[in-house]
Amino acid sequence: MENRELTNEIYLKNEIDANKGLAKGCFFSAVAMLIVWICYLTKLFNVSDHIFLLINIFFPILITVLASCVFYIKTKLIEKPKFKYFLIIQYAIVVMVLNVILPKHGVLMWAVLIILVNHYFDHKALLFTFIMVTIMLVSAMYLGLFYGEWDPALLNGTELISINGKQVNVENTTAAERYEWIKYLQSQGDNRLLKVFIYYYLPREIILILIVNISFAISKRSKKLLIIESEQVKENEKIKSELDVASRIQNSVLPKESCEYVYGIMDAAKEVGGDFFDYFYIDDSHLALVIGDVSGKGIPASLYMMKTETLIQSLTKTFKKDTALIMERCNVALCTNNDANMFVTCWLGIINLSSGELKYTNAGHNKAILILNGKAEYTTEKSGIILGAFDSAKYEEKTVKLNKGDKILLYTDGVTESHNPNDELFGDDRLLEYVNNNIKAPKDFVLGLRQNLNEFAGCTEQFDDITIMMYDHDFDAIMSESRIFKADVKELDNLFEYSSKLLNQLDFSSRDVIMINTALEEIFVNVAHYAYDNEGTVEITLSRANNKVTFVFKDNGKPFNPLERKDPNITASSDEREIGGLGIYMVKKIMDEVHYEYTNSQNVLTLIKYKK
């Protein structure tokens, strides 16, 4: 059904174009008639007065045709499919008038009309035109015989003919005199009316029949091509739609949230690409950075890319901080059933946000650039084997200490292999020079480098995916601290001082600070009153990362999950409402996330609040 609708849409567009073509053809034919009229008017052609009068009678028709054709093209009438029949009739009238005036030459215009109608790819319109031409051609020929320009061959006449014993110039004969001449020829055994039909009309009609047959074949073939075109357009739209979906799916696995200390972009050379980058928290104090480049381009590369990125993220969260082991496990998984023989280069690093320790492993990827103490240098490790090539490959982990303000630049070979119109590569040296001269915040740097690549490439088409990511090690943006309090409500002031310091550093409003402290008070009081039979302690860890604050309460008291309690019906009256539950309900409303687990003989309650 959709394919048929698309075919009809393309067919309709073709009809509109054909209507415009026919209207323009009619317009220019009328212009040709106007030129003939001017030639007669200026005596360039020597014609009799009655022929000149005849042309003057036709002149208003010409002006009407010229004006109407302009009107059709500039209005919505030209877009109506059935309007073609009116245009065909109008054009036929113009051709007939021209054929009457010029019996010797105007006959060629009938073939032009059939050729123009052939653009509709419509057998009915073509048949309609042929029947009309057949009738109007014979009419035009006989009218031209009596009223048109004198054709000596048509009337078997010379320059002077004898009519009723008078010598008359053929160019000045009237219709009545021509009729007398034809009667005279008939009396001499020369039936000109029959000969005109046999020797002039029929040969032209046979030629038109041949043209129509050829037009039928062309029309049939063209219509098939039109259907093929519609199917191709439909297939192209389907492919484009699938590529759009693939692009959205691919983009969905890339990081959505950006922060001031990590920023990355991925520009695919085609609709979808094989590059990827990611950064994610393993826990509150460890951040993973990963970048990769899959062999090939297009949908196969994008599918392999998503598989690799998902594997690395899953393995990283499973094996935590051993980047070499993560690469080994990922390589084995990618080598399994790798019938497409695809592979991927990859760089994985895990940063201890508290200590600044970076552990990383390189699997055949471009070397990272470390900006330490304001100086940019490539890492010196030996790159490991690409992922997906050999399932027995081993990888080596390297360690670097990052200080406040140090940065990491990760990129794919689309950066260094970008080339300009002179086939010069951007190259490693130019990249390092740019980094040293443009050390900025991650977002500003990444966008600046991308712009610099565009300027370097100029009009050269991008042939490879370009991916860039920068990390800025900023201790002010990341913090994690734990403190142990006695499970005693007298410690609340210390807790508030402890939490308010962190919240104020993040510029939470005074109202938010009060609300969050209210939630912390509710949890702390519950632990102090119900967790222990005697004295006990509660460990509270405060951390901030990626514009969120996390409060983790740990105690060794009685196992108790406060989230199992059903939320109270706050719309009920105080007499109908069950006792208890309002405190934890209030906590859930204040905080964005609340989680509980019992692990290592401890109650662990986690509260998370995002900075809006």
Image (cartoon, grey):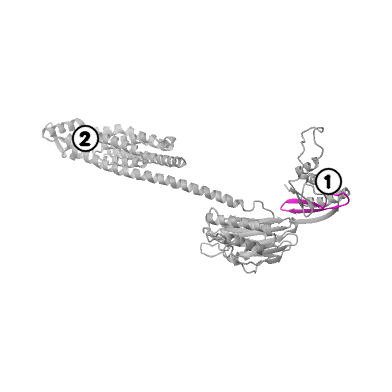
Of circles 2 and 1, the one toward us is: 1
**Where on the picture, by quarter, is residue 43?**
top left
Give the CA separation, mark 2 to mark 1: 117 Å
- Residue 526, label in figure: 1
* Labels 2 and 1: the sequence-earlier one: 2
Residue at (36, 42) in percent of width and height:
119
- The reply to whether residue 411 is visible in this rendering is no
Secondary structure of the residue carrying numbered label 2: helix
Q: How many residues crowd around disc 1 within 10 Å: few (fewer than 14), some, or many (20 or more)?
A: some
The reply to whether callout 2 and callout 1 are in contact (CB within 8 Å) is no
Which amino acid lies under the numbered mark 1 shown in the image of this protein?
Asn
Q: Is residue 97 left or right of residue 474?
A: left
The number of callouts visible is 2
Left or right placement of residue 467 versus residue 475 in this view: left
- Location of residue 464 with respect to 41 vertically, above or below: below
Helix, strand or loop status at disc 1: helix
Residue 540 among those drawn in magenta: yes
Q: Position of residue 255 (x, y in %)?
A: 64, 53
